[in-house]
Image (spheres, grey):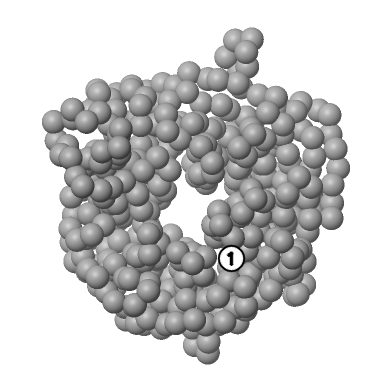
């Protein structure tokens, strides 16, 4: 365990003497249509929340009906795009050269009623130099700008009500780096430490912005998540770093044992991570996963069946907290989070090979409400799979090659 205390204050972006709140900006001409009022002319009342799928491709972003996988929106946008759910059930954040651009997926719940309408790539952008990670936790959404180290957070629900962007809180890292931050429910911020050359750990900032603890025992820190009890987990090149009010380092069994992405649920103390034990390996395929039991302070490495590999896009969590892994054999593998036992394997897509570059389109999986959504770039398709039975519920045939995927819950 590495714990130290600091009294130096964080450089905090402020507006006036009160300090934390910074006014939102960028109210484009489409702001009124994006506010999400039931009176929006393109919306209709529906019987229940209707999730939608967002898919990036070379040249834009698609929005699909999650039940039928029919395309309901196609929004042109140049450059390499990434996409993350904003956490409010209606919007996604598209990572662009300018920052985090707000995509209205056109589904939401208001006053107990659910609505569905047209999607829109709005003019609203959270500005960021080299926009990176998006983390939704509790009632806050946190954005990290790698080019400056700036951290921006906002009340997730405010994105539904704001005309333009909601009010934000902002912090600045000690140095710019490819990083990430989590805001806990009491306003505490956990933010990575690093610079352009290396990343070393995580520091803890109280709601006033004062640093109260740090750990520099997490080389190459990358990937984050919070498990049951609001325990935070960060991936390292020699294990994982856990924060539950104090830092604990869980060592990997290998000298080099990198966890770069962490997948968590609010109902389980176990985080699932990807795992790489070979620093000289070429490509992006992995053949083991990490099970991180924060209650037992245990890191367990689980090998996959012979011939099954995956990338960072191919892990998720199921409705029973199980690990869901899309293998290069084309199967969805369900793995017990406690024991690592293989529970089931469901064939979905053809066997596939790893990408030459991580940005290249390759299969990915996201899970929502017991359904796994699987992309198949080689076939320009996306599939919806019932995790309980393995049945393919729907297949969407696309005119473009899907890359990244996010689910907007409705």
State left or right for residue 81 relative to residue 249.
Answer: left
Image point (35%, 26%), residue name: 161
Q: Residues within 10 Å of mark 1 (few under 14, many from 20)?
A: many
Report x, y in % for residue 34.
Answer: 27, 30
Query: Which is nearer the eye, 273 or 266?
Result: 266
Q: Position of residue 70 (x, y in %)?
A: 17, 58
Q: Is residue 280 visible?
A: no
Secondary structure state at the residue bearing disc 1:
strand
382 vs 45: above or below: below
Q: Which of these two is toward me, 98 or 136?
A: 136
Residues 171 and 91: in front is 91
Quadrant of the rendering where the N terminus is positioned: bottom right
Q: Decide if residue 254 is in sight here.
A: yes
Judge left or right: residue 143 versus residue 248. left
**Which residue sits furthest top?**
17
Residue 346, image quadrant: bottom left
Residue at point 72%, 55% (across, down): 242
Residue positioned most to the front: 112
Image location (x, y in percent) of residue 119: 23, 41
| Residue at horizontal 29 percent and vertical 76 percent from the top | 391
Residue 294 placement (x, y as % from top left):
70, 60
Which of the 4 quarters of the picture holds residue 388? bottom left
Tell me the residue that label 1 is attached to.
272
186, above or below 320, in the image: above
Total tally of numbered discs in the picture: 1
Residue 317's place in the image compared with 43, above or below, is below
Residue at position x 41%, y 21% in the image: 25
362 left or right of 290? left
Q: Quadrant of residue 77?
A: top left
């Amino acid at each position: 365990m590495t714990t130290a205390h600091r009294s130096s204050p964080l450089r905090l972006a402020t507006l006036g003497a009160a300090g934390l709140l910074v006014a939102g900006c960028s109210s484009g001409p489409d702001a009124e249509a994006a506010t999400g009022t039931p009176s929006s002319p393109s919306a209709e009342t529906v019987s229940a929340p209707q999730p939608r799928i967002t898919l990036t491709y070379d040249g834009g972003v698609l929005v699909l009906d999650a039940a039928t996988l029919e395309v309901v929106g196609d929004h042109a946008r140049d450059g390499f795009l990434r996409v993350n759910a904003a956490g409010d059930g209606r919007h996604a954040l598209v990572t662009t050269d300018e920052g985090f651009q707000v995509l209205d997926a056109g589904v939401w719940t208001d006053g107990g009623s659910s609505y569905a309408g047209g999607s829109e790539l709005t003019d609203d952008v959270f500005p960021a130099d080299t926009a990176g990670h998006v983390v939704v936790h509790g009632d806050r959404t946190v954005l990290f700008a790698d080019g400056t180290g700036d951290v921006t957070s906002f009340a997730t629900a405010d994105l539904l009500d704001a005309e333009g962007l909601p009010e934000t809180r902002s912090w600045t890292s000690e140095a710019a780096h490819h990083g990430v931050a989590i805001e806990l429910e009491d306003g505490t911020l956990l933010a990575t430490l690093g610079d352009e050359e290396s990343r070393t750990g995580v520091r803890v900032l109280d709601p006033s912005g004062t640093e109260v603890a740090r750990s520099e025992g997490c080389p190459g820190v990358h990937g984050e998540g919070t498990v049951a009890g609001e325990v935070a987990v960060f991936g390292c090149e020699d294990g994982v770093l856990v924060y539950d009010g104090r830092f604990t380092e869980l060592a990997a069994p290998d000298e080099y044992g990198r966890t770069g992405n962490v997948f968590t649920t609010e109902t389980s103390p176990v985080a699932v991570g990807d795992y790489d034990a070979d620093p000289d390996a070429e490509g992006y395929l992995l053949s083991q996963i990490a099970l991180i039991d924060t209650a037992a302070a245990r890191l367990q490495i689980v090998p996959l069946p012979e011939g099954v590999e995956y990338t960072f896009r191919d892990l998720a969590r199921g409705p029973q907290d199980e690990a869901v892994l899309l293998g290069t054999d084309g199967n969805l593998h369900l793995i017990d989070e406690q024991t690592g036992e293989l529970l089931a394997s469901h064939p979905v897509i053809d066997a596939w090979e790893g990408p030459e570059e991580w940005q290249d389109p390759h299969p990915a999986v996201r899970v929502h409400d017991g359904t796994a959504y699987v992309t198949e770039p080689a076939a320009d398709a996306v599939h919806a799979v019932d995790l309980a039975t393995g049945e393919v519920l729907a297949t969407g045939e696309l005119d473009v090659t899907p890359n990244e995927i996010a689910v907007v819950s409705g």
